[in-house]
Amino acid sequence: MSLASETIASLRSKLQRKEITSSDILADLTARIGETNPALKAYLSVDDASAKDEASRARTELPLGGIPIAFKDNINVEGQPCTCGSRILAENYRAPYDATVTKSLRAAGAIPHGRLNLDEFAMGSSTENSAFGPTLNPWDHTRAPGGSSGGSAAAVAADIAIAALGSDTGGSIRQPAAFCGCVGLKPTYGRVSRYGLVAFASSLDQIGPITKTVEDAAILLNHLCGRDPRDSTSLDVPVPDFTAAIGRDIKGLRIGLPKEYFVDGIHAGIRSAVDAAVKQLESLGAHIEEISLPHTDIGIATYYIIAPAEASANLARFDGVRYGHRSKNASDLLDHYISTRGEGFGPEVKRRILLGTYVLSSGYYDAYYVKAQKARTLIRDDFTKAFEKVDIILSPTSPVPPFRFGAHGDDPLGMYLADAFTIPVNLAGLPGISVPCGFIVEDGKQLPVGLQLIGQPLDESNLLRVAHAYEQSTSWHRQKPAVQ
Amino acid sequence: MSQHHIDIHRIATLARLKLTEDEAVRYSGQLDHILNYVSALDAHDLSNVEPTAHAMPVFDVVRNDESASSFTSAQALDNAPKKSQGQFQMPRVVEE
């Protein structure tokens, strides 16, 4: 079996027993990427030379020593491209520094290897908004891998990455993990430094792992968290050893099912997979009870004010002066700005910048932005109240299975509505994880279903504990897509 | 906030985005549609609710005022699409 199919945990023990070297892993990965990526289009670029060099010097005594990790192409790795899936950063941009997560992974011995496709500036749920074309879902090449971290999830699912980093603003780690059949964890807001992650919506963005198993997510998370003086929103709180939660039973743990999430409109196959997962957790000793999150209905409206508003401010930096595309046809300064940005940004990014600019513009700020910030309080309070009764909240990750390319055509709102279960978690700053919980069959193809677990702030340990107990009592995570 | 029709050309100028006429028509319709959807918030009485800018309670974070090394000007200019004499180059804004 190719080493590319293995997990961080299994490669770690083989490396420590000196059965394999880091260069062996990289050779197997490179071979599989060469076979699979031309069709799948998960990687935008692969830095083989620098990774080979690092692998030859790998310090396997370190916790991630010699393990190659792939990066979503909006996280800076010094000297590598960081296109954000955008034409505006496609020409010659090289990251001038390492993101804080890149630095900490390197310090733990990991080797950055390859840059993964995404919706432009992480705006989207399918990778169809990438300026470089979509990544295909490894389970069915006619369908989207989810997004925005679709390249990360597809690469992990197709065994062309050992593990990957993604970023999650409204579900962008969890939804593609669900669509591709892998594990995706969004940490508590502030757990992980955002320094070096190209900002989309600063009050919502978090970096997190996309992995083959829950244990691997815990291992990676151990090396992502911590206070960073370069991100004023990063939290100065103790970071536990998340792997200590792995393997603990869940007897007596209280799991809440929000009644507002279990409504009509969920695909029947997803509903029955999630219902079966609930029974499974109950058989493992968890107490299941119904809870209410009464403001669920305003989650998407709130998000589609706050996220575009913050995006319109963050993306003002792309002005063709310091980096990125610069229009060659500008007649004067204003024309320089509007032409550079008009040529550089794709349709979804333009749409969100326009929406954000509108809701922040004079006369509308209170009516939209402040109102959304207040609505956010209601959504957060819903969760706070629910967590007085339960330890973990459970839902489907997505109400719909992986959709066909073009399914949302010219209907951006239709695409936004599919994020109803993941968005409130970002608005409330909570940790969330998606784990495989079954398959549905459409047109003769198996398509993965994801189970979302939501934890209390900073309680990633319990989240991983439940996710791991569930995962180990099923075999969903061991199923792999056939190479197409 | 209900039923506002977005003045797409004004907003595009504020956002520093050049749009084709096709784009202006398409985005205008889509944004009106989205704005009508987000007016769902009007159904809730929010007058006595405190706004949340940030989900976790972190306020007034400052670092010590100490000098530290940073980018050199050469590094800062590395990605510049147009530079001259150690500076970013821009279209002329002052007439001679």
Image: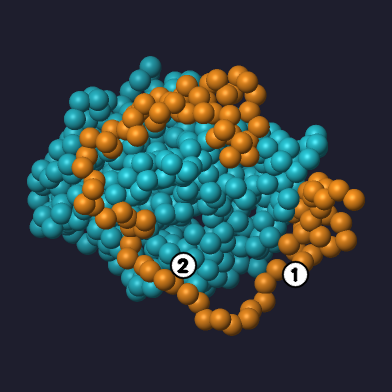
* Chain ID, orange in image: B
Q: Residue furthest right?
A: B96
Residue at 47% in and 48% down: A310
Is A408 on the left or on the right of A322, as rendered? left
Q: Which residue is mark 1?
A: B72
User: Badge 2: how crowded within 10 Å, few (<14), some, or many (20+)?
Assistant: some
Tell me where residue A116 appears, x and y as whole percent: 57, 44
Inspect this view and state whether residue A292 appears.
yes
Name the residue nearer the viewer: A185 or A435: A185
**Do badges 2 and 1 share one subunit?**
no
Residue at 22% in and 39% down: B44
Q: How many marks?
A: 2
Residues under labels 2 and 1: Cα distance?
24 Å
Q: Which residue is mark 2?
A: A232
Is A318 on the left or on the right of A373, as rendered? right
Q: Relative to B36, does residue A73 appear above or below in the rendering?
A: below
Inspect this view and state whether residue A161 appears.
no
Name the residue nearer the viewer: A218 or A320: A320
Tell me where residue B66 appears, x and y as whole percent: 59, 82
Q: Amino acid at mark 1?
A: Thr
* Chain ID, cyan in image: A
Q: Amino acid at mark 2?
A: Ser
Q: Relative to A98, does residue A174 appear above or below in the rendering?
A: above
